[in-house]
Amino acid sequence: MRKWWNMPKIVDHDARRRHIAEAVHRVIHDKGMESVSLREVAAEAGVSMGTVQYYVTTKDQMLLLALERLASWIGERVAAVAARQSTPLDVLRATVLELLPLDEERSYLNRIGLAFQASSMVSENQAAAMRAGYASLLSYLAGQIRAAQAAGQLAAHLDAGKEASILYAFAQGIVNATLVGHYTPEDVAALLDHQLARLVAGWTPDST
Amino acid sequence: MRKWWNMPKIVDHDARRRHIAEAVHRVIHDKGMESVSLREVAAEAGVSMGTVQYYVTTKDQMLLLALERLASWIGERVAAVAARQSTPLDVLRATVLELLPLDEERSYLNRIGLAFQASSMVSENQAAAMRAGYASLLSYLAGQIRAAQAAGQLAAHLDAGKEASILYAFAQGIVNATLVGHYTPEDVAALLDHQLARLVAGWTPDST
């Protein structure tokens, strides 16, 4: 009979890929994207280089794994926050707030996001992952806008796709200015609410 | 009498700093920020390492010089395009369009801008330069909005500072999605005009 301590280890590959991806995040965040290497990532993850290589062999693959994990992490956070809201307009607002660097964890995610915005300029694989992320998030936001229109919370004539694009560009474009300290979190929330207010049903320019 | 060929060279230090700064831009653009080094920059600029060191000695100084040149270059381009417009609203629209990656040269500037958005996360000197740039550009945009209000082109009740912040965040936030190909230049211009239309005097939700 095989002794229990010789039993093959049961490896949760998804958990291990996530663990490695999040080690890549920490290396990017603390040392910059140029520091991402097999050696650095293995050390940060506390595993052997061989273990990392089982999942990813090139730097481009490591970055892609980290980018996909970043996108699914943000997706999980948005889903969790959405589940706590009671109306489509609340979901819309909470989703955009979730994307903004308004506390330490969201700042961490956004600093890594800015690094990928830069590095997707020189990696077609990353650019493709970014396009997929934009399509998915924008379609989610547009869906919430349509639901809010159906519920009478947002003006019925709005073009949901355009409004989603403008809202999301606003959110992404205010990240750096907030992280370097030009805006406070309160400033950013007030700007978002200012933009949302003009989408609300029945709003006219004179009523703000 | 001193012979003319022994005359000390007259060096235009501003031109040479600009030349070096633009070599740093090309290194960042073509090889990434991690490739910026004395050796790379000197080779790209076609000057000796000693010449580069006369102006900047550390990588941080090289990046700061390049960031300041990027900001003044964008400032010069905005001033040139503004001078060709006839009304404050035209200036506002042309300024925002000038910041967007709608052709090869503006895409080049924006790819470098994205690299600095990322690297300003780990350099307080760069973050300070970014803050100064935001303050200056946002104050310019708010001034154009006020001028357009005074001219009756934009609704008088608008908060110029808030509208400038939202417009500029929109412009900055749509850069990556455009450069990776999620939006065409035409999409981006249409989104900008959609946002501007609702700031126009007398506009009401039903009139778009």
Image (cartoon, coloured by chain):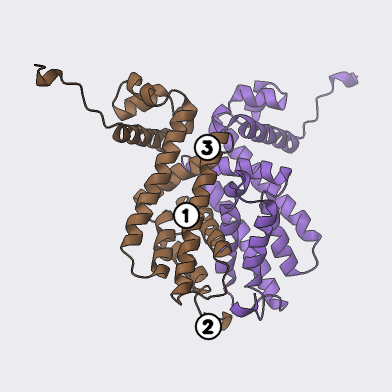
Chain colours: A purple, B brown
B135 left or right of B23? right
Label 3 marks a residue whose chain is: B
Image point (49%, 40%), residue name: B115
Discs 3 and 2 carry the same chain letter: yes
Label 1 marks a residue whose chain is: B
Query: In front of the other: label 1 or label 2?
Result: 2
Q: Which mark is residue B207?
A: 2
What is the three-letter code of the residue carrying label 3? Gln
Label 2 crowd (10 A; few <14 / some 14-19 / many >=20): few
- Secondary structure under tag 1 reads helix
Give the residue number, with chain letter if any, for mark 1.
Answer: B178
In the displayed orientation, state which residue is furthest to the front.
B1
Q: How far is mark 1 from mark 3, CA to CA?
A: 25 Å
A172 left or right of B7? right
- The reply to whether discs 1 and 2 touch (Cβ–Cβ < 8 Å) is no
- Secondary structure under tag 2 reads helix
Point out residue B157 in the picture as x, y percentages from the top left corner: 57, 74
Label 2 marks a residue whose chain is: B
In primary-sequence order, the first of circles 1 and 2 is 1
Point out residue A108 in the picture as x, y percentages from the top left corner: 68, 41
In this rendered view, identify the residue nearer to me: B79 or B45: B79
Q: Which mark is residue B126?
A: 3
Compared with A177, A58 (above or below) is above
Name the quadrant of the N terminus of chain B.
top left
What is the three-letter code of the residue carrying label 2? Ser
Discs 1 and 3 carry the same chain letter: yes
